[in-house]
Structure formats: C-alpha cells, structure tokens
Image (cartoon, grey):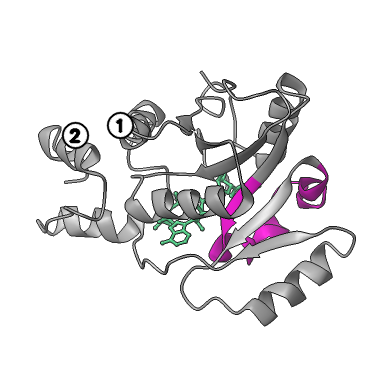
Amino acid sequence: MPGNSPASSKIGLLGGTFDPIHLAHLRLAEEVREALGLAEVWFIPAGVPPHKRAEPHLPFEERLRLVELALQDHPAFRALDIEGRRPGPSYTVDTLLELRSRYPERRFYFILGWDAFLEIESWHEYRRLPELAHLVVVSRGDFSSAEARKQAQRLFPNHRVHFLRVTRLDISSTEIRRRRRAGLSIRYLVPEAVFRRIEEAGLYL
Ligand SMILES: Nc1ncnc2c1ncn2[C@@H]1O[C@H](COP(=O)(O)OP(=O)(O)OP(=O)(O)O)[C@@H](O)[C@H]1O
Ligand SMILES: O=C(O)c1ccc[n+]([C@@H]2O[C@H](COP(=O)([O-])O)[C@@H](O)[C@H]2O)c1
C-alpha cells in the first residue's frame, strides 16, 4: 500500500503505459528520487493510455504485474492500480485529482520524459496539471535544456517546471517488443524478474 511515509512527504509519480516496464524507467525514477529528496515514487500504469494509437499489447493486469515484479526489491518504489480501476481513457488530470483528495497532505511530483513533455499540450486539461502537482521533466534522447525552458515558459508561465538531466539510456518499450517479435534477447533491458516472466509466459511474441 502506498502511503507508508509521513503524511507531508514528497511523492514522485511516474505514469506510463509500461508495455513493458524497463530499466530506463527505474533508473530515471531513482535519479529523480535522489535529486529531489522524494520519500517514495509511485508507478502508475495507464489503464487506457489516452494517446497511444493502438491498444496496449498486454492487458492492464499483466502490465501491472510486470511493474510489481520490477519494483519488488526497492523499499521506496510502489505500484498503483488507480488507473486500472477507472473506466475510459486514463487522463493524468483525473489521477492527480484523485490522489490529491486521497492524500491531501502529500506533495506530488509528476515525472515525465522529454518526449512526453513535448506533447503535453495535447493532454486533457493540461493547463491544470502544474496546479495539481509539480512537473518534473527528465531528459530523453536529444534533450535540449534551452528548448525545454522555452516550452515550459510558453505553456506554464506562472509555474516552475523542474528539468533534470538523467543518465541517457536509449531503451524503449517499443524496441523491447520489436526484439521479442524478432526472437532477440531482451535480457538486461528489463529487470531480471520481468525478463523471466516475459519469457515464461511467452509475452510479446
Ligand atoms: N529511456 C527513457 N529515458 C527517459 N524517459 C523515458 C525513457 N523511457 C520512457 N521514459 C518516460 O517514462 C514515461 C513512461 O514511458 P512509457 O511507458 O510510454 O515507455 P516508452 O519506452 O516511452 O514506451 P513506447 O516505446 O511504447 O512509447 C514517459 O514519460 C516517458 O517519456
Ligand atoms: O492526460 C492525458 O491526456 C495524457 C495524454 C498522454 C499521456 N498521458 C500520460 O502520460 C504518461 C506517459 O504516457 P505514455 O503514452 O508515453 O505511456 C502516462 O501516465 C499517460 O497516462 C496523459
């Protein structure tokens, strides 16, 4: 259960399709946790990802299970099933509203990659997001901090957006699924327990 840390603690939220979760997700969460002094990071698999063109390749329960396997050894990382229990597209604004009403004392930091931040204008009620949580954008691929600051200034002139350069790991769920379909190894791109589950259950073939 989330919420073991003191009521007023700083909590990172990492939303994602996690189809599947991979080591770049874990590493970025760890670096944000350290840099911002977060008590916990809650990983939130999307029930119905609003912007992914096709359906997720695995059902919510299986993606959640992989996230739980990935997080099992980290005392400050937790998986939330909040978006799997809500019907319809998993809008971040709804998730933040729900978490704020459930945990009013906590200070939330919503973490997203640079690629996601570039598209945030297309998110449902995106203007409300920085009122509900601090936004933390992490570098990914060809991240430019000048461009990032410009985009933040244009979209959210009255809020501070945090930018954090994290260790560059060019891992994506898309590439992992492609490797599986091609019969190639995904070992060391995902945590060992996730690798074993994907192999044993024959996922993404
Ligand atoms: N390698 C990475 N470096 C930095 N941020 C990442 C990386 N992979 C994912 N993220 C960020 O983590 C969040 C969740 O990512 P998501 O579950 O969509 O994985 P993905 O690898 O981007 O998936 P896909 O390849 O299917 O688009 C997003 O905010 C995304 O920008
Ligand atoms: O709220 C929205 O409209 C919205 C649109 C696109 C993405 N998101 C969220 O952004 C996070 C990363 O999304 P994705 O598609 O890159 O896995 C995940 O938590 C999604 O629910 C949210």
Q: Which residue is label 1 attached to?
A: 69
Relative to the observer, which residue lies in front, 125 or 136? Answer: 136
180 vs 86: above or below: below
Pinpoint residue 73: horizontal percent, then vertical percent. Answer: 33, 33
Relative to the observer, which residue lies in front, 70 or 125? Answer: 70
Dividing the image into four quarters, tell me where ligand 1 lies. Answer: bottom left
Residue appearing at x 22%, y 45% in the figure: 204
Residue appearing at x 15%, y 32% in the figure: 201
Q: Which residue is label 2 attached to?
A: 197
Task: Tell me whether the residue at label 2 lies in contact with that at label 1, contact meaning CB atoms closer than 8 angstroms.
Answer: yes
Q: Classify mark 1 as within 8 Å of ligand 1 or not, answering yes or no.
A: no
The amino acid type found where label 1 is placed reads Leu
Residue appearing at x 37%, y 66% in the figure: 169
Pinpoint residue 102: horizontal percent, then vertical percent. Answer: 71, 20
Cα distance in 3D space between marks 2 and 1: 9 Å
Classify residue 122 as left or right of residue 57. right
> Which segment did they paint magenta?
110-131
Q: Residue furthest right?
A: 158
Name which of mark 2 and mark 1 comes first in the sequence.
Answer: 1
The quadrant where residue 50 appears: top right
Q: Classify mark 2 as within 8 Å of ligand 1 or not, answering yes or no.
A: no
The magenta stretch spans residue 112: yes
